[in-house]
Image (tube, grey):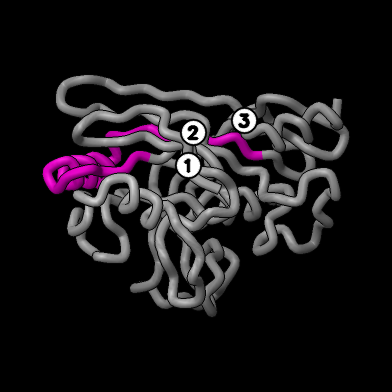
Amino acid sequence: MKPEIIYETDDIAVLNKPSGMLVHPTPKSQEVTVADWLLDKHPSVKGVGESKERPGIVHRLDRDTSGLMVVALNQDAYKELKALFKERETVKKYYALVWGTPNKDKGKIDKEITSINGIRRTVEEYSQIETNRTRNALTYWELKESYDDYSLLSVKPVTGRTHQIRVHLDSIGHPIVCDPLYGKKKKCPEDLARLFLHAYFLQIPYKGTLLEFEIPLALELEQFLKTLE
């Protein structure tokens, strides 16, 4: 299991991360991560970034989320990319298959997110929240296709909070299919067996050039949609 290189220069690389692969090491995991793979492919990336455990890693995708992410191959690129993400000048879009059908074709979710015992939740679900652990979060979504029990959405997060899309979609009553953390009340279809969340679009205004990348759904996700048809 390894990422596919979509685009590469001396400064940056855009990858298609497979589902099931961690972006960087965690205290509880010894498996190979995107950071390990990147360091093996580009040894010079060692020391790039702010942490030796995350060389070249500018942003992340959840382990079970597949799709596009950009990494920095030198420190100057890292600083520029970090600034772009911080100022929200990048655009990311995801495909998410959710349970049920929304009552409108598009919408936005503007709900603060906090962490309660390690689980992210929207603030409105709780009456008492520690404000220093609360962060604003904004997500736009659009209905792309409806099925009997599911809906395929295109989702654009404006902010980049941990588990943002998963928490926000669950908060409006449409958890992502096969989400083991926020969709526990729904049984994962046997034909899928992975989180249906895929980063399919990435836009980066890098050094005066507007870079845009778009990839199709991961094969296993596309195959599952065909079973619904």
Q: Earlier in the sequence, mark 2 or mark 1?
A: 1
Name the side, left or right, on which 192 lies relative to 35: right
Element type where label 2 sits in the image: strand
Element type where label 3 sits in the image: loop
Q: Nearer the viewer, mark 2 or mark 3?
A: 3
Name the side, left or right, on which 25 lies relative to 194: left
**Residue annotated with mark 2:** 93
Q: Earlier in the sequence, mark 3 or mark 1?
A: 1
Which of these two is toward me, 154 or 78? 78
- Name the residue type under label 2: Lys
**Residue annotated with mark 3:** 217
Q: Nearer the viewer, mark 2 or mark 1?
A: 1
Q: Is residue 91 magenta?
A: yes
Specify few, some or many for label 3: CA neighbours under 10 Å numbering under 14, 14-19, or 20 or more.
Answer: some
* Residue at point 14%, 48% (across, down): 75
Q: Earlier in the sequence, mark 2 or mark 3?
A: 2
Q: Residue furthest left?
A: 76
Q: Which residues are magenta?
A: 70-96
> In the rendered picture of this protein, how many numbered marks are placed on residues?
3
Residue 3 got which mark? 1
Q: Are marks 2 and 3 in contact (CB under 8 Å)?
A: no
Query: CA–CA distance between discs 3 and 1?
Result: 15 Å
